[in-house]
């Protein structure tokens, strides 16, 4: 199982939501999320944003939306 820092986790989230990760990576993401409240909340926010945009696959999010989410994440994890 891989271990992620919060920054590395953010890079994996779109693939995670799109079910595109291999098993060890996915397990590592899950483990991080279960132990890190900040990232778990970020994931909720990310999901809510994706839903608000009409159920598009995360990798189809426009660059500005993705940037906004990522900068929200970085502010939470200085
Ligand atoms: Zn984290």
Image (cartoon, helix red, strand yellow):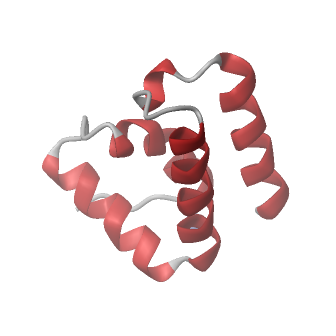
- Residue at (79% x, 42% y) in the render: 71
- Residue at (61% x, 69% y) in the render: 41
Q: Residue furthest left?
A: 23
19 lies left or right of 49: left
**Image region (quadrant) for ligand 1:** bottom right
Where does residue 50 sit, x and y in percent of width and height?
Answer: 53, 40
Quarter-wise, where is residue 77 in the image? Answer: bottom right
Task: Please tell me which residue lies in front, 12 or 8.
Answer: 12
Q: Is residue 59 visible?
A: yes
Where does residue 73 sit, x and y in percent of width and height?
Answer: 72, 52
Task: Give the answer, above or below, for where 70 lies relative to 30.
Answer: above
- Residue at (25% x, 35% y) in the render: 20
Quarter-wise, where is residue 6 in the image? Answer: bottom right
Q: Is residue 78 visible?
A: no
76 lies left or right of 18: right
Q: Quadrant of the C terminus?
A: bottom right
Task: Give the answer, above or below, for where 67 lies relative to 47.
Answer: above
């Amino acid at each position: 199982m891989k271990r992620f820092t919060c920054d590395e986790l953010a890079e994996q989230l779109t693939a995670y939501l799109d079910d595109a990760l291999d098993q060890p990576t996915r397990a590592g993401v899950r483990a991080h999320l279960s132990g890190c409240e900040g990232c778990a909340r970020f994931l909720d926010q990310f999901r809510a944003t994706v839903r608000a945009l009409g159920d598009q696959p995360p990798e189809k999010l426009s660059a500005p939306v993705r940037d906004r989410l990522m900068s929200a994440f970085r502010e939470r994890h200085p």
